[in-house]
Image: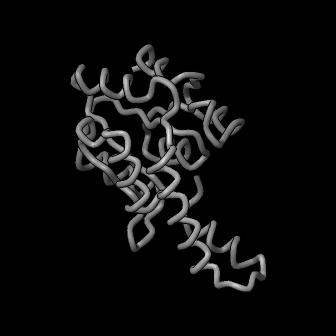
């Protein structure tokens, strides 16, 4: 999705009786509780990640989400053991192209893929000269047309990589 600041700026434009930063914090806390109680992964995500990991692929996460969000998701679904790295904007609010560039420097590989559902993902891949895979079930719906590959089900990733 969009970087957190975009959402907070939108909240600020609504002229609400609560500050946008306070409301953003409350909504984030609520989101984390919902993930912990009833969050689910899309079908075949964990099995595909496990299969890629067991096949020797270097896997990681690069998200516009904050540390608490990422940590909550990784803990809830026990995904951390499969990942070599986790990158997020941090306090200096780095954008995804910059994060991907840093990842490629730290984890150079002959062939790289960025899997995502929003134009941020596909632009970051293009800016860094790597292939992108768009998941059609995410938030970006038509934005996945910008990706080098499009998949309906995460398991299809095994046919691409």
Residue located 58% across and 25% down the image: 150
- For the residue pair 67 and 117, the one nearer the viewer reads as 67
In the image, is residue 15 above or below residue 56? below
The x and y percentages for residue 89 are: 42, 63
Colour convention of the picture: one colour
Residue located 45% across and 69% down the image: 93
In the image, is residue 124 above or below residue 64? above
In the image, is residue 11 above or below residue 121? below
- For the residue pair 152 and 144, the one nearer the viewer reads as 152
The x and y percentages for residue 129 are: 44, 39
The image quadrant where one finds the C terminus is top left
Residue 130's quadrant in the figure? top left
Left/right placement of residue 44 relative to residue 75 reads right
The x and y percentages for residue 77 are: 37, 39
Residue located 49% across and 50% down the image: 35
Residue 80's quadrant in the figure? top left
In the image, is residue 113 above or below residue 95? above
Left/right placement of residue 72 relative to residue 24 reads left
Q: What is the residue that sits farthest to the top in this orientation?
A: 159
The x and y percentages for residue 3 are: 55, 62
Q: What is the residue that sits farthest to the right in this orientation?
A: 15
- For the residue pair 82 and 29, the one nearer the viewer reads as 29
Residue located 41% across and 48% down the image: 73
Label total for image:
0
């Amino acid at each position: 999705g969009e970087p957190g600041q975009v959402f907070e700026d939108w909240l600020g434009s609504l002229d609400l009786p609560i500050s946008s930063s306070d409301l953003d914090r409350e909504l984030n806390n609520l989101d984390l509780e919902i993930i912990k109680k009833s969050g689910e992964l899309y079908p075949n995500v964990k099995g595909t990640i496990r299969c890629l990991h067991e096949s020797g692929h270097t896997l990681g996460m690069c998200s516009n989400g904050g540390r608490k969000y990422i940590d909550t998701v990784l803990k809830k679904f026990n995904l951390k053991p499969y990942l070599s790295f986790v990158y997020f904007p941090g306090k200096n609010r780095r954008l995804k192209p910059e994060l991907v560039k840093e990842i490629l420097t730290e984890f150079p590989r002959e062939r790289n893929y960025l899997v995502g559902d929003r134009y941020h993902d596909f632009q970051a891949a293009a800016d860094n000269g790597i292939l992108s895979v768009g998941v059609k079930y995410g938030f970006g719906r038509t934005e996945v047309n910008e990706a080098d590959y499009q998949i309906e089900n995460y398991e299809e990733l095994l046919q691409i990589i």
